[in-house]
Image (cartoon, coloured by chain):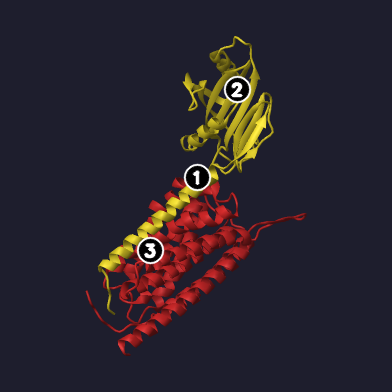
Amino acid sequence: MANKQGSLGDRFAEITVVLVTLVALIFGGMYKSSVENASIPFEAQGVSLAAPKGWIQASVRGNEIFRASDFNSSGFATTYSVQKIAVADDATAPEVANFILMDRAQTLDAFKALDQNEVSDSLGRDAYLLHYVYVSSNPDATHASIPNIVRGADFIYLKGGYAYVVSFQADDQNYDRDLGRFYRFLESLQF
Amino acid sequence: MKESHPVHERKHIWRDGFLLVVALCVFVGLVFALDNAMKPTFNATTLALTGVFLAFVPAFIWLAFFYIQDSVEPEPKGYVLAVFVLGGLLAAAVGIPVVDNLFRVSHWIYTNTLSSILGGILVVGFTQEFLKYAAVRYSIYNSDEYDEPTDGVTYATAAGLGYATMLNINFVISNGGVDLGAGMIRMAVVALAHAAFAGVTGYFLGRAKFESESIWWMPTGITLAAIFNGIFNWLLGIVTQPTISLSGAKDNAWWGLVFAAVVALATTSAVLALVRRNIQALKAAQGE
């Protein structure tokens, strides 16, 4: 059989295959972003935000006004939550941070605070940031699963006699990858 | 470079394809029946090892048929096996990390119907079909042993089965083993689907080497295979969706196997018809 292997046309065809595949993957990546960044508006108690579309909004507890989890995450379901806590007018962010730390230490297993410092978010708002880690395990003792290491970040904002605590918790393996989307969530937050 | 020798059709390639579908369905039935009758107990290691062994069964069946029947102008067996291994290695080194880690497909592809179809075609389909194409195009394609249009189908099927085998091994390892009956159905479905889509790419590869096709010929082939891949996986999800009633949940995995077998038979028949027509045209051009 005659073959045209190595011809110029063959090489162009080869390059075209690579280009078409790359274009498909780029469009696929863009579509992925559009699906992952899709949101639905949420408003409660003077706080408005863009809640991730497709996440499960859980019932809120205590001071929480918003809680949503991504159950497609591997391991611990990546979770965003917002708390609105009434504080004294002269309360400082480190004081609120200590209160949050005490609360988390009492309710979360193997809780460790990693660091805390004052930051400005991407909109220039002053916040106090806590990083921490804990272990999450299924409370059912017969459930055969290994506990997950969870990393968390709390952004604490003080405004008008309230502390707004915006939390991001994700499996240790997903934390860095999911952080970018959380920042976009943080940008959508108005109080 | 110009070479010339009479064009043949390796008819057993089609028999191998049809026999793979039939033998796999029979094998799955046997595993299911034995699993139900004997109810074997495994520890974590033996369960994982059994799963990995079962992952090789579809490829073993196809290769066995191929080896037995490839007697007239035989294709070098080492090359077929090497392309099979290359397909598997590309899946492990590139395909699975790209789909699972870079695009994190499981996070968003099941959001809605459009995501399932577009994600299945643009990300999963193109990644998998390009890698199967690459396993052939950058290895055996330039060899003198690749001397018939049918060789495209042979080697692409080998690459597709290598890719499917690695997907199945990954599935077994990441789940710490699989239920024998349901796990074997899933592995058979994956193997049949990948062999079928690779056959489409193989037809385009076969013509790409020996005929003057436009530069869009091969991209069209990959795109078609990717579209089939994406739509198949979307439909498979619908077909195998568990049915929940008052008496409990009903697993529809068997319908998945039936669906995959029908798709594999239909695709193989279509590729067979196209290759035959192409070979007749080439023979006519050679004045036979």
- Chain A as rendered: colour: yellow
| Cα distance between the residues tagged 2 and 3 | 54 Å
Q: Position of residue B267 (x, y in %)?
A: 50, 72
Q: Residue at x 25, y 69 (%)?
A: A7
Q: Residue furthest top?
A: A90
Does B112 sit left or right of A5 as displayed? right
Q: Callout 3: residue from which chain?
A: B
Q: Residue at x 64, y 34 (%)?
A: A42
Q: Residues within 10 Å of mark 1 (few under 14, many from 20)?
A: some
* Mark 3 lies on residue: B133
Asked if B220 appears above or below A72 in the picture, the reply is below
Does B133 sit left or right of B22 as displayed? left
Q: Which mark is residue B29?
A: none
Q: Position of residue B31 (x, y in %)?
A: 57, 64
Q: Quadrant of residue A14?
A: bottom left
Q: Residue at x 59, y 49 (%)?
A: B111
Q: Amino acid at mark 3?
A: Tyr
* Mark 2 lies on residue: A164
- Chain B as rendered: colour: red
Asked if B77 appears above or below A73 in the picture, the reply is below
